[in-house]
Image: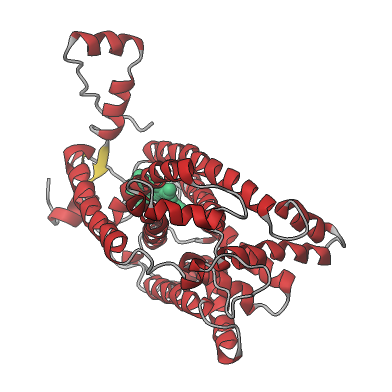
Amino acid sequence: MSSHEDTYEPKGRVSKWMDERLPIARMMHGQFVDFPTPRNLNYLWTFGGILTFCLVVQIASGIVLAMHYIPAESMAFDSVQHIKRDVNYGWLIQPLHAVGASMFFIAVYIHIFRGLYYGSYKEPREVLWILGVLIFLVMMATGFLGYTLPWGQMSFWGVTVITNLFSSLDEVIPGLGTAVVTWLWGGYSVSGATLTRFFSLHYLLPFVLCGLVALHIWALHVAGQNNPTGLDIKTKSDSLPMSPYAVSKDLFALSVFIMLFAWFVFFAPDYLGHADNYIPANALVTPAHIVPEWYFLPFYAILRAIPSKLGGVIAMFGAIAVLAFVPWLDTSRVRSARYRPYFKWFFWLFAFTCLALGYLGSLPAEGIYVMWARIFTAYYFAFFLLVMPFLSLWETPTQMPGSISEAVLGKGSK
Ligand code: HEM
């Protein structure tokens, strides 16, 4: 862990006794109170804490839901309604969990885009970033599995469409795809067996997430935090102790986030969901228009933009996998886009592309929409495979401040 002055002093007899045997309080104090944070962190740096809060809310509300939910084909849908109507505080806990999933993804997307803008993936934070990509993957798997559980029409057909994608492996090795899909389903179609195993995995994965998040924060505390200038901490005046400075900022941002969260939970709990999920799953009636949850839409658009099934699957998984290589794809020596006059614009075009793909993913895959989805898919990959490696060859960064404190306090500051 990065070294700094240790100011921890156990006060009472019990804490002194404990400190000599298991100095856990000393470690926590060193990592979350004394820890030097760059003095110029903006509100985008509060999302890591917000994400930790989201994970805790999902696990706590999920455990209570699991006490009443029944993962059986004939009872799953009704058990969710029973939770909402009859269980004490079920009306609150169920939307906390369902809206919480969306809030979690809003926060994670902001967190990822922050990292891309300020070059937080660059040396020495490559492992921290890759752990983030793994977290993102596990989050997506958890969200997907969870959406199956209410066993509404969109749950059923969403899972049918997405699991069926694996059948494209038949094009690589005949029979392989079909075997994988049968194995995933636990039968020859999406059924009660699928529901039970998805419930089991949906309960398991958040704990895998906890492990990954612990590693993520550990890696962060080895490399130290990046900051809007992208410069390293050089002198003591570049940093402030995490508590109370960064902590109070985190708490303020968290309070605002909770207000937005509460607004959805209390006033629009179904807004981020799909109306068809209030119709019980029916294998004999296909919804006119099958769409995944909003946070999968950009990837869904990429999947449908490619004419071949296998090609679409490769592009969709490739769109996530490419993130893991970003630390090596970006060849610029300057971290922060603040000092990269052209990269900045390519970045905002990329952000727009992701929004546009999300919108296109919600529309039927026909006519002009498909063409636009192809154009945006092409730019999505061009950003990583062309802009990141080659732009820095001719881009001249703008004048950078000499240090973090100079960026905040002006030249000549002590
Ligand atoms: C459950 C999800 C996650 C949690 C709880 C989490 C937690 C955190 C925390 C507490 C921080 C420090 C505070 C901050 O910089 O905001 C952080 C930093 C960071 N995270 Fe995450 N994170 C998550 C997901 C991700 C994902 C998906 C990525 C990228 C794909 C990522 C990449 C990073 C990077 C690069 C940093 C260092 C940022 C910097 O110092 O500039 N994280 N994370």
Residue in view at x 54 percent, y 60 percent: 329
| Quadrant including the N terminus | top left
Image-based side of 337 in relation to 15, left or right:
right
Residue sitting at the far right: 174
Q: Which percent across, then down, holds residue 151?
A: 56, 59
Front residue of this view, candidates 218 and 302: 302
Residue at horizontal 62%, vertical 52%?
A: 195
Colour scheme of this structure image?
Answer: secondary structure
Q: Quadrant of residue 325?
A: bottom right
Q: Is residue 29 above or below residue 369?
A: above
Residue found farthest to the front: 86
Residue 339 pos. (x, y %): 32, 65
* Residue 328 in view here: no
Q: Is residue 123 above or below residue 214?
A: below
The mark tally for this picture is 0
Left or right of 359 in this view: 370: right
Q: Quadrant of the C terminus?
A: top left
User: Which residue is at 38% across, 61% downward?
Assistant: 106
* Position in image of residue 394 (x %, y %): 46, 72
> Residue farthest to the bottom?
367
Quadrant of the image occupied by residue 346: bottom left
Q: Position of residue 364 (x, y in %)?
A: 57, 83
- Residue 250 in view: yes
Q: Nearer the viewer, residue 382 or 47?
A: 47
Image check: 27 left or right of 158? left
The residue drawn where x is 76% and y is 54% is 187
